[in-house]
Amino acid sequence: MANKYEVALVYSVKNGDDAVNALCEKFKTLIEENGTIESVDDWGKRRLAYPINYETEGYYVFTVFTSEASFPAELERVAGITDGVLRVMVIKK
């Protein structure tokens, strides 16, 4: 049975726009391979509430998707070991 989830990803902007766009495409493709994307809300570059790894700005992307219950844990695992991802949070809607 498929469930609806929302993932919030915050990318590092210190490596430039090309690196941010590559990460956005990587995670969009990963989600499409394992589920169905319903919407993508690209907030762009924003100031962080507090420094993360000495960085004060991040690139925010929120994605609502439908997938099997086992995929969100894998998504968090992949995001956690990917360079350039500052934070990830997956919630069940």
Image: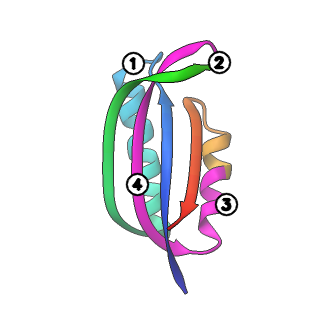
Q: How many callouts does the rendering have?
A: 4
Q: Does the magenta stretch include residue 62?
A: yes
Tell me the element at label 3: helix
Q: Where is residue 92 in the image (x, y as percent from the top left)?
A: 55, 66
Quarter containing the N terminus: bottom right
Q: Name the residue under label 1.
A: 16
Residue at coordinates 65% horizontally, 71% vertically from top-left? Answer: 70
Badge 3 amino acid: Ala
Query: How would you rate the neighbour count of disc 2 (Cα within 10 Å): few for under 14, some for 14-19, many for 20 or more?
Result: few
Disc 3 + disc 2, Cβ < 8 Å: no
Disc 2 + disc 4, Cβ < 8 Å: no
Q: Name the residue under label 4.
A: 63
Q: Mark 2 points at which residue?
A: 53
Marking on residue 72: none
Left or right side of 65 for 42? left
Q: Position of residue 26 (x, y in %)?
A: 45, 46
Residue at coordinates 63% horizontally, 48% vertically from top-left? Answer: 78
Calculate the distance from the C-alpha at mark 3 to the C-alpha at mark 1. 28 Å
Badge 2 amino acid: Asn
Q: Where is residue 85 in the image (x, y as percent from the top left)?
A: 56, 34
What residue range appears in magenta? 53-76
Calculate the distance from the C-alpha at mark 1 to the C-alpha at mark 2. 16 Å
